[in-house]
Image (tube, rainbow, N blue to C red):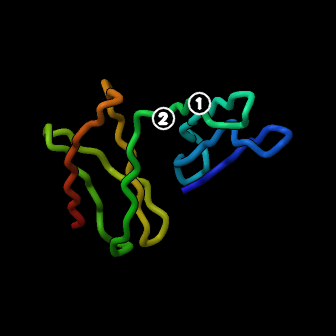
Amino acid sequence: MHFEYAFDDIGNRRNMKAGGDNTGANLRSAGYVVNALNQYGNREVPGYVNTPGTASNNATVTLWGDNGSYGTTSRKGEYFSFFDVFSGISSMGCGAYLSAQAV
């Protein structure tokens, strides 16, 4: 998992990037809006969920969504990471279920 942060001159977080693949590319960005009182007034949240974990180096890890979709993971040694895209997320929240299988 990779992280990058950008701050303004007085230390307010303006942007954050996280996730990515094994090379650090394809990071997901979240922006922050600060008002004149240095309060966060808004935050953009990317529609992704990261599912990290560990499994034996020789295991193939697959994650299944509750809608029948599946995807393979990025691996680095025993660690794996999976990113799934969620569309239509509202401010009221969302629910999603994932199950992992390592073979």
Q: Identify residue type, mark 1.
A: Gly
Q: Residue at x 29, y 62 (%)?
A: 60
Query: SS at mark 1?
Result: strand
Q: Is residue 7 above or below residue 31?
A: below
Q: Position of residue 45 (x, y in %)?
A: 48, 35
Q: Residue at x 30, y 36 (%)?
A: 93
Query: SS at mark 2?
Result: loop
Q: Nearer the viewer, residue 14 or 96?
A: 14
Quadrant in the picture for residue 101 = bottom left
Q: Position of residue 32 (x, y in %)?
A: 62, 34
- Point out which mark residue 41 bears: 1
| Tally of numbered discs | 2
Structural distance between the alpha carbons of marks 1 and 2:
13 Å
- Point out which mark residue 45 bears: 2
Q: Identify residue type, mark 2.
A: Val
Q: Residue at x 44, y 60 (%)?
A: 75
Q: Residue at x 22, y 43 (%)?
A: 96
Q: Is residue 37 above or below residue 20?
A: above
Question: What is the crowding at mark 1: few (fewer than 14 residues within 10 Å), some, or many (at least 20)?
Answer: few
Q: Quadrant of the C terminus?
A: bottom left
